Image (cartoon, rainbow, N blue to C red):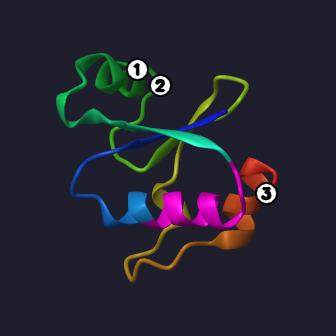
Amino acid sequence: MITIYSTTQCPRCHKVANFLSKKNIEYKKVVIDDDQDAREELIMANIFSVPALKLGDGKIVSLKSFVDESMNIDEKKLGDLVGA
């Protein structure tokens, strides 16, 4: 299962979650605002921004380059990453 690391005020995170839902990909959402363990997990993976995904193999990937300033998702790149 995929895990999305998010914050409560992250529009890019919501875009990624909507994309996964649209592709019928199951995911768990972890809001790091009040989850110190999740924040530490991201830091240990050298990821300092959200959205980020933990893939089925345990690898954590930053999605910073997958969503541009205008909130457009690179659907091909994200789809390739998650197997959609």
In the rendered structure, which amino acid carries the disc numbered 3? Asp
What's the CA distance linking mark 2 and mark 3? 21 Å
- State the residue in front, 80 or 4: 4
Instruction: Tell me the tag on residue 45.
Output: 2
Q: Position of residue 24 (x, y in %)?
A: 71, 57
In the rendered structure, which amino acid carries the disc numbered 2? Ala
Residue shown at the point (73%, 24%) measured from the top left = 57
Q: Position of residue 30 (x, y in %)?
A: 39, 35
Locate residue 69: give its quadrant: bottom left
**Nearer-N-terminus badge (1/3):** 1
Tell me, yes or no, whether the highlighted magenta stretch contains residue 40: no
Above/below status of 26 relative to 76: above
Q: Quadrant of the C terminus?
A: bottom right
Locate residue 40: give its quadrant: top left
- State the residue in front, 18 or 62: 18
- Taking the view exactly as shown, the residue that stands out farthest to the left is 34
Q: Are marks 2 and 3 in contact (CB under 8 Å)?
A: no
Instruction: Tell me the tag on residue 41.
Output: 1
- Picture mark count: 3
Callout 3: SS: helix
Residue shown at the point (31%, 16%) measured from the top left = 37
Residue shown at the point (79%, 57%) measured from the top left = 80
Magenta stretch, residue numbers: 15-25
In the rendered structure, which amino acid carries the disc numbered 1? Glu
Residue at the spot of label 3: 80
Above/below status of 39 relative to 22: above
